[in-house]
């Protein structure tokens, strides 16, 4: 390919890690690229929690606009930030490998209580701006206080160090990719089957213009079809719930060695409402999301 691909990305350390990873993957295919940093609504509004920012796709819209305008050729997103529908003219054409999909709980060492669930001390102050994490956290420990926290991953860990919080929740994927020093904290690694992550957590999505056949063909070489099978199920759950990334909804799907699919859903109406959960297994992914969602919403469930 003779042309240089322009990759659009957010400017945080994690977003740049993701964009650089894609650059390396493209280089293996003989494709050269450059990065273009784009500020999104979610980056600019730092004083509000996610559920108070209007609309969906507040970490993606400006990048999608640049793609439609032709100022970039490829957008790299955290797939969990993407609305389920791409704007007309754009297409998610490939996905990456999946980093650990779990959420991890980081606790200040002086606030650890090994006798309590999740090792949190009594009435701990826990930082998260995710409605999904708030709801599930309260379902495990209703004595805790939830406090909003914003900023990138290193900033949040610094806020925990400085004593603003007793503990915070972060995606394992971001922490793992940044290879941060976590020795200051007790890290409780939450099981994604019990503390259900955001749909497609840990996966990168590569979005292009639908008409750009050249790049779409190249991206097929770095597409992970096995990951796509499970994230399609998770994102179908999100679509059925008509939710954005601020909805209190977790969906996690695994495919076992026999090829069977297992899906876990955790959903609340609001961040401080009871969490309903469902697990469903099938030999195929066909209609799995629909069947599980119907079960979740059936009057006799929970």
Image: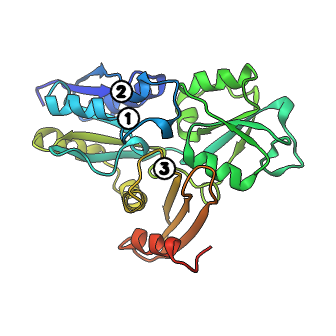
Of pointers 3 and 1, the one earlier in the residue sequence: 1
- Residue farthest right in this picture: 115
Residue at the (48%, 50%) spot, across then down: 247
Q: Which of the pair 301/119 is nearer the observer?
A: 301
- Residue farthest bottom in this picture: 300
**From mark 1 to mark 2, how far is it between C-alphas?**
7 Å
Instruction: Give the label on residue 58, or none.
Output: 1
Residue 58 vertical position relative to residue 234 in the rendered view, above or below: above
Of pointers 2 and 3, the one earlier in the residue sequence: 2
Residue 142 vertical position relative to residue 13 in the rendered view, above or below: below
Q: Position of residue 277 (x, y in %)?
A: 59, 66
Residues marked 1 and 2 touching at CB (< 8 Å): yes
User: Is residue 99 shown to the viewer in this render?
Assistant: yes
Residue at the (36%, 26%) spot, across then down: 40
Which residue is tagged 2?
40
Q: Position of residue 132 (x, y in %)?
A: 56, 49
- Circle 1 Cα neighbour tier, 10 Å, few/some/many (<14 / 14–19 / ≥20): many
Q: Secondary structure at mark 2?
A: loop
Q: Position of residue 139 (x, y in %)?
A: 70, 56
Q: Secondary structure at mark 1?
A: loop
**From mark 3 to mark 1, how far is it between C-alphas?**
13 Å
Q: Is residue 55 left or right of residue 108?
A: left
Which residue is tagged 3?
247
**From mark 2 to mark 3, how far is it between C-alphas?**
19 Å
């Amino acid at each position: 390919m003779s042309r240089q691909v322009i990759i659009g990305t957010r400017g945080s350390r994690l977003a740049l890690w993701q964009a650089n990873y894609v650059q390396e993957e493209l280089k293996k295919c003989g494709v050269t690229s450059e990065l273009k940093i784009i500020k999104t609504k979610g980056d600019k509004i730092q004083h509000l929690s996610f559920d108070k920012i209007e609309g969906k796709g507040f970490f993606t819209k400006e990048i999608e606009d640049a793609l439609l305008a032709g100022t970039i050729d490829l957008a790299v997103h955290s797939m969990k930030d993407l609305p389920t529908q791409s704007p007309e003219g754009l297409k998610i054409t490939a996905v990456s490998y999946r980093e650990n999909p779990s959420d991890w709980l980081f606790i200040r060492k002086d606030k650890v209580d090994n006798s309590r669930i999740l090792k949190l001390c009594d009435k701990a102050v826990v930082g998260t701006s995710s409605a999904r994490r708030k709801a599930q956290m309260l379902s495990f420990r209703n004595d805790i206080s939830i406090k909003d926290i914003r900023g990138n991953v290193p900033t949040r860990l610094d806020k925990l160090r400085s004593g603003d919080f007793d503990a915070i929740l972060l995606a394992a994927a971001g922490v793992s990719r940044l290879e941060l020093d976590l020795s200051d904290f007790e890290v409780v690694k939450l099981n994604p089957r019990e503390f259900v992550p955001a749909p497609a957590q840990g996966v990168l999505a590569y979005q292009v213009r639908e008409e750009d056949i050249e790049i779409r063909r190249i991206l097929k070489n770095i597409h992970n079809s096995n990951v796509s099978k499970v994230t399609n199920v998770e994102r179908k759950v999100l679509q059925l719930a008509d939710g954005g990334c601020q909805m209190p909804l977790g969906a996690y799907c695994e495919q076992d060695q026999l090829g069977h699919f297992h899906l876990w859903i955790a959903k609340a109406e609001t961040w401080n409402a009871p969490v309903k959960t469902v697990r469903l297994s099938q030999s195929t992914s066909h209609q799995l999301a629909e069947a599980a969602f119907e079960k979740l919403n059936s009057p006799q469930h929970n």
